[in-house]
Image (cartoon, helix red, strand yellow):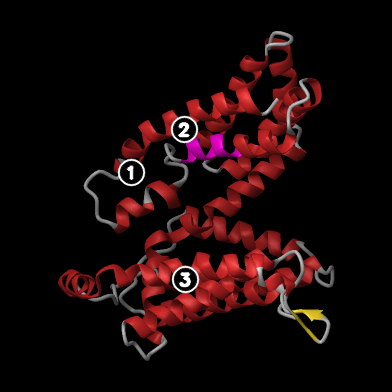
Amino acid sequence: MIKSEYFFWLVGAVFLVMAAQMVRDRTNPKRFGSAGFWGLLGAAFFYSSGVVDKSLPAEPLGVAVLILIVLGGCGLTGKGASHTPSREKRAASAARLGNKLFLPALTVPVVAMICATLAKNWKIGGEPVLEPGYETILGLGVGAIAALIVGMVLLRERRLSVPLHSGRNMLESMGWALILPQLLAVLGSIFQSAGVGEQVGRISEAVLPDGQKFVAVAVYCCGMALFTIVMGNAFAAFPVMTAAIGWPVLIEQMNGNAPAILAIGMLCGFCGTLVTPMAANFNLVPAALLELKDQYGPIKAQLPTAAALLVCNVAIMALFAF
């Protein structure tokens, strides 16, 4: 049986290999900080398996996270010389391949869907091929490997070092922002444990008029968007706003449909993701990678769409979730 931890070990191994590449890259003035950051993150993927099965203490993993924050927050990571082809060569290659360039990207969701819908029923010797409950995440991993193979065949590249170097360049360009969603999701759990959602709920219940369904829906949806803008991640805002308004008010008091309310609420959070610089890996890093003149260009372009989607989500929840 293919277990989910195998996928996480593979991710950790990739980080460790790239960290070794960074140590040898003398063009990077902060090569040791960069190598330490990504190497420590890679090692955490292996160590966390022991934390999950309780064979290892969790405290060292927490210390590792604090060290990552120091390395990233103090600017101790950096980027070396690019190993990617020149802009002219990339443009010529894109013109030659045309729409075939989309094949690796499309391979990932196709394989993930197959694993989530079909492969979960496959068995060998009476044992499932994929670990039950983790078919989707394993499908994502298998899809990524398949996409790598498709890309190498498409580009007629035989050296595995080439995609590794390209991946390292992307890793260094994105920097610490790559793990921002995970950190912010943890922040949401901390807020929930600290009772932030409960306090917001008390304030909301005191302010909201009794029986005003539409007002409660608007507050929940807009609150999800606003908390996401502040925190940078809908997964961080979700436990706070759901504990405050979504569950006690909309579901328990007003008898709303729980799956519909929670799903639409998360979509409202994604509206906030579109317009916040806190979601650096979504909005600021792409601007840097694409060398846009305005680093806030993606946010400005996405703002009208985010506003329209938020209004639609409020209407859909009010009309169809009760």
Looking at marks 1 and 3 on the same chain, the residue that comes earlier in the sequence is marked by: 3
- Amino acid type, label 1: Pro
Looking at marks 2 and 3 on the same chain, the residue that comes earlier in the sequence is marked by: 3
* Mark 3 secondary-structure assignment: helix
Dominant secondary structure (helix, strand or loop) of the stretch shown in magenta: helix
| Residue shown at 38% from the left, 67% from the top | 170
> Would you name the residue on which mark 3 appears?
107
On the image, the x and y values in percent for residue 57 come to 80, 66
Quadrant of the rendered image containing residue 300: top left
* Mark 2 secondary-structure assignment: helix
Q: Is residue 290 left or right of residue 74?
A: left
Quadrant of the rendered image containing residue 23: bottom left
Q: Kindly identify which numbered label has been placed on residue 309.
A: 2
> Contact (CB < 8 A) between labels 1 and 2?
no
- Amino acid type, label 3: Thr
Start-end of magenta stretch: 266-273
Frontmost residue, 73 versus 125 = 125
